[in-house]
Each structure stands twice: as structure tokens, then as C-alpha cells.
Amino acid sequence: MTEIRIAVVGAGQIGGNLARLWFRAGHDVLIAFSRDAMQLPARAAALGDHVSAATPEHAVSVADVVLLAVPWDVIDEALRQVGPLAGTIVIDATNQFGHSAKPGNGQTVAQYNSARMPGARYVRAFNTLTAGFQAEASSRPKDERTVMFLCGDHAEAKRVVAGLIDDAGFVAFDLGSASDAAIMEAPRRPGAVYGEEFRLERARTFVTSNRASR
Ligand SMILES: NC(=O)c1ccc[n+]([C@@H]2O[C@H](COP(=O)([O-])OP(=O)(O)OC[C@H]3O[C@@H](n4cnc5c(N)ncnc54)[C@H](OP(=O)(O)O)[C@@H]3O)[C@@H](O)[C@H]2O)c1
């Protein structure tokens, strides 16, 4: 495994859990972005020995990969604080629960959010399962692993993120480009993988039949 420096922007339920899992897998993790930055060092120490706190701008400037895991309504503020993301691999775990603007008809969250971070090598992942479930399922034996879906338009970025999905204890399943992301986006509904647990074989069958019926 190659050590990757990861900036977790929003170390709450989703980001805090992934910070812990990635640190345990041997990566270097920085956490950033809080309503009270003073308590971030203590949170970092609680997550792991080599997890540190940083300002959003610094964390992103030194990171190979950024995880965005903040509430929908504060995405703009988080992006403002992290600064330019051109060339950076960004994993977007957010879901569109909130009051601020949302994607238009026929537009996926992946398309909408990637346009908010010009030039970023955007990958959507870790958004389909609850944080509690992710924490519980991450320690399963290899042959019982749960699928973690991803999508995006950058093959190399998806390769890196698929590795981080594996390191976190899941099986990566690539659904295609940002325009293919609807199936993995809220709300939970028939025909979507959002909110559902899949093992690899069932995911293959489900996605193939979903595509055939479109
Ligand atoms: N929870 C889930 O089961 C789940 C599952 C899939 C996807 N998601 C998505 O992942 C994203 C994060 O969800 P979460 O449940 O991890 O959220 P959360 O536990 O509330 O964590 C939010 C993080 O953002 C930070 N933050 C900074 N400024 C904030 C502000 N003004 N208001 C609120 N938080 C602020 C929080 O830091 P401080 O607390 O230190 O301020 C915290 O680290 C959301 O878009 C959500 O839809 C959540």
C-alpha cells in the first residue's frame, strides 16, 4: 500500500469514521473545517495517533486526496475555506439534504458538485450508506465485504479512490461517470443502490438489470 495524505474536510460521522479507518490502514490524515476549530486537535487525537488538525486551506494544500463530508448547506463555505482544488482528487460523500440550492432536473449531484470545484478530479463515493453502517461493516472479512459505489469522470482518480475504498474495508464498484451517478444518489427508492447494502455479485446483477431496463 502506498501511503496517501488525506484531508478530511468535515470530520463528523462520515468523515471522522473514514479518518479513523484510513489512519488505521496506514495513511496520513489531516482533519479540518469546524464550527469550533479549537476543539479539532482533541478530535484528531481521539481518532488516531497520527491524525492531525489543520486549517482547511493548509490541509488541502498538502493533501493527495480530499474527502468532502460536510452538511449540504455548508458546502459553499467549506469550498471557500479550502480554496482552489484544481488537480486535486476530491471524494464527495455529501447528500442533498438541506435548504440551499440543489441540482436541476436531470442533473446528478455529482455533476452539480463537481462544477462547484473547477478542475478538481472529482469522485463521488461513501454517500450511499449510513455512517453507523459504514463503521460496523468496515471490519468484515474480505469475502463478506460490502460494496461501496463510486463514479466520476477521471479514471486515475477513481483508481486511487478504489484503493482507499479497499483500505477502508469495502469493495469498490464503479458505476461510471458523473452523469451516471443518479442510481447512487438520494432518495432511497426502487431501482437505486442508494441506502442499500450490496455484496459484489448482487451489485453486478442489480446494476446490469437496472441499465437493461432503462
Ligand atoms: N451521517 C450519515 O449517515 C451520512 C451517510 C452518507 C452521507 N452523508 C453525508 O455526509 C455529509 C456529512 O454528514 P455527517 O453525518 O458526517 O455530518 P456531521 O456528523 O454533522 O459532520 C459535519 C462535519 O462538518 C463540520 N462543520 C463545519 N462547519 C459546519 C457547520 N456550519 N454546520 C455543520 N457542520 C459543520 C462539522 O464540524 P463541527 O461539528 O466541529 O462543527 C463536522 O465535522 C452530509 O452531506 C451527509 O448528507 C451522511
Image (cartoon, rainbow, N blue to C red):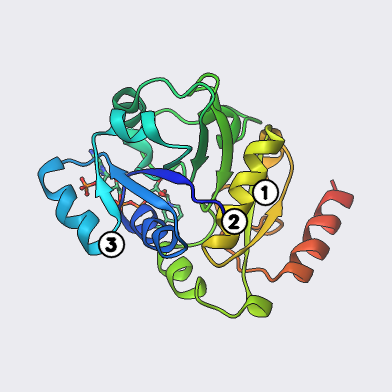
Decide: few, some or many residues near mark 1? Use Cα within 10 Å; few <14, some 14-19, many ≥20.
many
In the foreground, 121 or 133:
121
Relative placement, left or right, of 156 versus 10 is right
**Which numbered circle lies on residue 183?**
1
Label 3 and label 1: CA atoms lie apart by 32 Å
Residue that label 3 marks: 47
In the foreground, 209 or 119:
119
Residue 66's quadrant in the figure? top left
Badge 3 vs badge 1, beta-carbon distance below 8 Å: no
At x 65%, y 79%, the residue is: 144
Badge 2 vs badge 1, beta-carbon distance below 8 Å: yes
Q: In which quarter of the image is the N terminus?
A: bottom right
**Residue at the farthest left position:** 38
Measured as percent of width and height from the top left, residue 150 is found at: 63, 48
Q: What residue type is labelled 3?
A: Leu
Q: Can residue 36 be seen in this view?
A: no
